[in-house]
Each structure stands twice: as structure tokens, then as C-alpha cells.
Image (cartoon, helix red, strand yellow):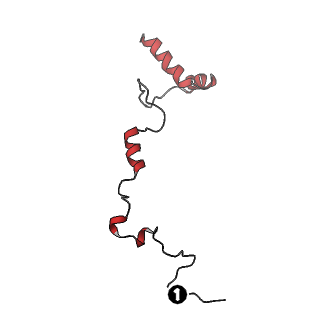
């Protein structure tokens, strides 16, 4: 088994003309603003669900336990049904 010199990192490849470290500064590619950054900025990509035209307001409402239980028994969407019932009661 041959001993490697201590300053040679393991699995190092020889330096070639394609290696940016061996190129003169004038020949280095411009990496300051990658192309994908400009394309991403122009695309105006948004994440998540689109915003609703009418948004709701989060609040805390204290209800009697029997009223809350009656709405929850009706299944998913019980909060929306409370909202609809309040609208109907207020004539909105």
C-alpha cells in the first residue's frame, strides 16, 4: 500500500483547464445572478392557494355547549353553517 502525501485530499481529481480554480479571472463565468433567479422573478410565482376575493376574519366566539354540539353533529362545515345561520338571522 502506498502512502499519500498529507496535503493531498482523498478522492481529489487532477486540476484541468475546465476547473474554475485554474482559470484566469477574466475567463470565469459570471455566477453573481444565475439565470433561474431572473426567470423566477419575472414569473411572479406565488405559492399556496389563491387568495379569496372575500376573506373571513378569525375571531373567538363563546357558545353554549348544547348549541356547539348540535352544529358539530352535522359534520364537516359546521362553522360555515353557523355563519350562514347568523347571516339569515341578521337579514344579510
Q: How many marks?
A: 1
**In which quadrant of the rendered view does residue 11 lie?**
bottom right
Would residue 1 appear left or right of 83 to someone viewing this image?
right
Residue 59: x %, y % from top left: 43, 31
At x 41%, y 26%, the residue is 55
**In which quadrant of the rendered view does residue 67 lie?**
top right
Residue lying furthest front: 17
Residue lying furthest left: 26
Which residue occupies the foreground of this view, 16 or 83?
A: 16
**Above-or-below relation of 53 to 31:** above
Quadrant including the N terminus: bottom right
At x 39%, y 53%, the residue is 34
Residue 72: x %, y % from top left: 60, 26
Would residue 45 appear left or right of 75 to someone viewing this image?
left
At x 37%, y 64%, the residue is 28
Quadrant including the C terminus: top left
Determine which residue is flagged by label 1.
6
Residue 85: x %, y % from top left: 50, 16
At x 54%, y 20%, the residue is 81
Which residue occupies the foreground of this view, 31 or 15?
A: 15
Classify mark 1: helix, strand or loop.
loop
Residue 9: x %, y % from top left: 53, 79
**Above-or-below relation of 77 to 18:** above
Residue lying furthest top: 91
**Above-or-below relation of 1 to 66:** below
Amino acid at each position: 500500500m502506498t502512502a499519500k502525501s498529507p496535503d493531498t485530499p482523498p478522492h481529489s481529481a487532477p486540476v484541468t483547464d475546465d476547473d474554475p480554480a485554474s482559470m484566469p479571472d477574466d475567463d470565469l463565468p459570471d455566477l453573481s445572478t444565475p439565470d433561474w433567479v431572473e426567470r423566477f422573478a419575472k414569473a411572479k410565482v406565488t405559492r399556496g392557494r389563491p387568495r379569496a376575493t372575500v376573506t373571513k376574519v378569525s375571531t373567538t366566539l363563546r357558545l353554549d355547549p348544547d348549541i356547539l354540539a348540535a352544529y358539530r353533529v352535522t359534520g364537516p362545515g359546521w362553522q360555515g353553517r353557523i355563519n350562514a345561520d347568523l347571516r339569515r338571522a341578521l337579514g344579510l
